[in-house]
């Protein structure tokens, strides 16, 4: 099937990024959220990011205007029912995702493909809560979506070949590269990345180095573009903790145990950039390490 209309559930940093690249590639996009403020902020963010691409001569003004015209918003989740493809990009909590799919499925067209942008949760288990496990798969974008080239495609145990090929065609149309991953906790990227971040937090927790020295060591010693603690703040410490818990529970290996310091930061509400405090304090002109 040829996908023309795309529904995006969630208007946060991942949802608005997905809507951005889909609309720019020519898809009609309907973005849903429970908050009008979140939807308004998402449209403003998309407009700003597209304007940046125009200023850098990545796209023309006409392309930006056309993309903005393809994006509609709604506070009613079930309005997404007629879409050809739905990408869930809500918070990384399985119960929330399951509730979304359960609310959606009575309103879906027979051909609609359901996908989740989850970074670690079992695709097979999410699919089992729907009426179409054969038309369900993982569609995992990297953050920030307009910049990052990779998309992980994850098939559940029941995902059929037609669904996989349809999603692969979408990845190709938006000019990104697909990596096929098996349905195991964390898939490929986060199976490798999150334990590295967690180990950086343990290094801080055990006093081996402070925030600045750990990040500088990995930037200058391993040529990483961003230190692991700065990256954790960018991702969101709550998301990092959620993924580590999925890895720890799903693989039953103590090497994936979340660092107690990571848990403490999340309990304090210090979630990184989105709350202005994490391993760095972002409330001033220059980020300052908090430890």
Image: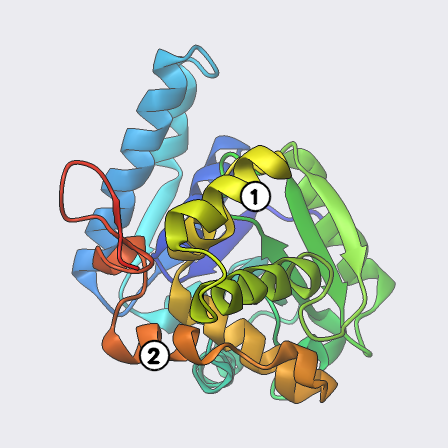
Which of pointers 1 and 2 lies earlier in the amino acid sequence? Answer: 1
Residue in view at x 66 percent, y 36 percent: 176
Q: Nearer the viewer, residue 7 or 235?
A: 235
Which residue reaches farthest right? 161
Residue 218 marker: 1
Q: Is residue 273 left or right of residue 63?
A: left
| Residue 1 seen anywhere in this rendered image of the structure | no
The residue at 24%/58% (across/down) is 277
Q: Position of residue 245 (x, y in %)?
A: 55, 81
Q: CA distance from mark 1 to mark 2?
A: 23 Å
**Residue at the (59%, 82%) spot, across then down:** 257
Helix, strand or loop at disc 2? helix
> Looking at the rendered structure, which numbered label has been put on residue 264?
2
Tell me the residue at 76%/61% (across/down): 163
Query: Whole-percent x and y of residue 290?
Result: 26, 58
Residue placed most toward the observer, 188 or 272? 272
Instruction: State the image coordinates of residue 231 (x, y, percent, origin top left).
Output: 46, 50
264 relative to 228 in the view: left or right? left
Query: Where residue 121 appears, x then y in whole percent?
Result: 61, 76
Question: Which is in the foreground here, disc 1 or disc 2?
Answer: 1
What is the quadrant of the C terminus in the image?
bottom left
Judge whether 107 appears above or below 137 on screen. below
**Which numbered marker is on residue 193?**
none
């Amino acid at each position: 099937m040829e996908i023309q209309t795309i529904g995006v559930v969630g208007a946060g940093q991942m949802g608005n990024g997905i809507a951005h690249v889909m609309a720019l590639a020519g898809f009609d996009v309907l973005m849903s959220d429970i908050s009008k403020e979140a939807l308004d902020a998402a449209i403003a963010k998309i407009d700003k990011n597209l304007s940046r691409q125009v200023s850098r001569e990545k796209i023309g003004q006409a392309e930006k205007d056309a993309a903005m015209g393809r994006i509609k918003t709604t506070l009613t989740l079930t309005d997404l029912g007629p879409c050809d493809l739905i990408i869930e990009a809500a918070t990384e909590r399985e119960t929330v995702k399951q509730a979304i799919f359960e609310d959606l499925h009575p309103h879906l067209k027979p051909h609609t493909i359901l996908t989740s942008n989850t970074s670690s949760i079992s695709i097979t288990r999410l699919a089992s809560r729907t009426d179409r496990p054969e038309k369900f798969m993982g569609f995992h974008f990297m953050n920030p979506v307009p910049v990052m080239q990779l998309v992980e495609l994850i098939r559940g145990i029941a995902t059929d070949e037609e669904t996989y090929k349809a999603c692969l065609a979408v990845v190709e149309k938006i000019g990104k590269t697909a990596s096929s991953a098996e349905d195991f906790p964390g898939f490929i990227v986060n199976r490798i990345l999150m334990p590295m971040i967690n180990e950086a937090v343990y290094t801080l927790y055990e006093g081996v180095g402070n925030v600045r020295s750990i990040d500088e060591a990995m930037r200058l010693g391993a040529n990483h573009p961003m230190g692991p603690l700065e990256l954790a703040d960018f991702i969101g410490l709550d998301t990092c903790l959620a993924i580590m818990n999925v890895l720890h529970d799903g693989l039953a290996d103590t090497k994936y145990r979340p660092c107690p310091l990571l848990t403490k930061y999340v309990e304090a509400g210090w979630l990184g950039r989105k709350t202005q405090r994490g391993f760095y304090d972002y409330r001033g002109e220059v980020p300052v390490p908090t430890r």
